Amino acid sequence: MPSPARTAGAADSGGMTEAKKILRETFGLREFHKLQGEIIGALLAGRSAIVIMPTGGGKSLCYQIPSMLRGGTGIVVSPLIALMKDQVDALRQHGVRAACLNSGMPYDEQRRVMRDLRGGNLDMLYVAPERLLTDGTLAMLGEIQLALFAIDEAHCVSRWGHDFRPEYIQLSILAERFANVPRIALTATADEATRRDIAERLALRDAKQYTAGLDRPNITYTINQEGNARRALLEFIREKHPGESGIVYCLSRNNVDQTAKWLSANGVRALAYHAGMDKDAREKNQTTFLREDGVVMAATIAFGMGIDKPDVRFVAHLNLPKNIEAYYQETGRAGRDGLPASAWMRYGLQDIVMLRQMLENSEAGEDFKRVEQRKINALLEFCESPDCRRRVMFAYFGETYDRTCGNCDNCMHPPETWDGSVAAQKAMSCAARTGQRFGAAHLISVLLGRDTEKIRRFGHDKLSVYGIGGEHGEAEWYSIFRQLTAAGLLAPDMHGGLGLRDGSRAVLRGEEQIFFRKLPPRARAKTRSGAAQAKPPPMLHGEDAELFEKLRAARLTLSREQNVPPYVIFHNAALIEMALAKPRNARAMEEVPGVGQVKLERYGGVFLDVIEKFLRARG
């Protein structure tokens, strides 16, 4: 389908009528949601905007539809070159004239894109900030008609955010050189300081801010504080997401490699991604993850920004993220299709020690360190709180959540607490009497009265705290030390030794009580091994689930023929609707959400044929 007639675009009823027509006929959707209509109306009227909307909340449509309706080309600034092609492929499947421009493209292809741009033959052009800011690109943009500028992942402009990128600061030049072109800055997460930076650094001080609710109700949040990390991860995958796509974030490159190997050895199809890999191998793994079903990617946090893969069923963290913003952004890559998904995290005392050591040893200024320390404290409060995960997390972002979600571990299995005042006194006394320079492992050995060479060498078997902790096991003591460190009563030095901090004196004197979370009962070890088959979506049963698998197989064949990810053909949500509704003709197929005119023409016959054959086989 050719792109709609281009107009100067105004937010009158006619402009929004055309916008709704594109929504239905091009993207196969019925209604705007979560402020989309209001934001689109503002851009059509030539006004700029700042948009904070959760991942999967429909941010892209906010600039894609105005780019198609306003005169000229919409320029989309995206930080990741590797993912632009998939974004462009997805738009082209809808019949939208889109392209990307980056230094990794062959020269002839770059020339073709620039020729199409100058000729007014593009609705949207995706470009990295580094390429956009070159003199040649800016001069070229000055020669053509521009619909708008969309600055995606706008939190990258803020040094207070979780993914600061210096080149983003220079994007303020767009306001100077293209003053009459509306700009829209978009991000999934931004605390108050980051929002101020976005407005200031991108010269959007007068732009209206649109903030949709943070909630992603389809995501289940679970935090696993103790136990063997990889074994717990494997049990989680086998139990909750066998044969499904997921991302596992690790702190170090070595941990990424080892985790991918270990999962693969235990029947999970896992790949690795980090900056230390060969570029071709890294890109091959990313392409496999994006274009095939059931792949788990073990990665550092360098992986994931801008990923449009909608059927990531889980995001797991094997270490603490940097802060709550990073956690929300990274876990938001799960369940973009709105279907049930999981955010699972495992962390231990060493993660807390490492985060605080990294901050203390950094060369950042004291103001920055104070802000980052507050963010670490807020993250630890989120992890250790017995309250609803959503309520604690959203409060951090200034959003009130006045109920319990029923879809996090604390709501589904409320944690028990116990008066740990005496145990805290023993733990902190042990740290003090051993010189405040030993880590938790040694302190626990002292408390348990173990006979080790290290204890004898330092004479710690002669201390009054030696052997006074026999009422708790090793795992429980680790939990106690972790919670004391999270609470700021103990803190690590540059070598990991735990020392007393403000507030510890009141607990030691018995002036304040302290309560700890009880360790959850250990889950039974799973003995099942080997590759697991993906479970059907929970809303499908019997023949509906069987039809879904046949539709998915047909989609995979089409995607391989065209060398595009399967979700570019149709999202899982669309296949689920087909399996439930079982349309028998083109008119019925067009009513399936996600089936626009172009996709109906290209693929409608294929999927109708699958449905017809399936129904005939069942009489």
Image: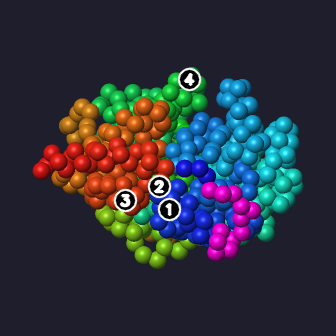
**Mark 3 or mark 1, whichever is nearer to me:** 3
Residue 534 versus residue 570: which sits nearer the camera? 570
Q: Is residue 11 magenta?
A: yes
Looking at marks 1 and 2 on the same chain, the residue that comes earlier in the sequence is marked by 1
Q: Nearer the viewer, residue 609 or 328?
A: 609
In the image, residue 282 above or below residue 300:
above
Q: Residue furthest bottom?
A: 402
Residue found 65% across the figure and 68% down from its top: 15
Residue bounds of the magenta highlight:
4-15
First in residue order: circle 3 vs circle 1: 1
CA separation in Å, label 3 and label 2: 11 Å
Nearest to the eye among marks 3 and 2: give it: 3
Q: Which one is earlier in the sequence, the residue at label 2 or at label 4? A: 4
Residue 141 magenta: no
Question: On residue 596, which mark appears?
Answer: 2
Q: Which residue is mark 4?
A: 280
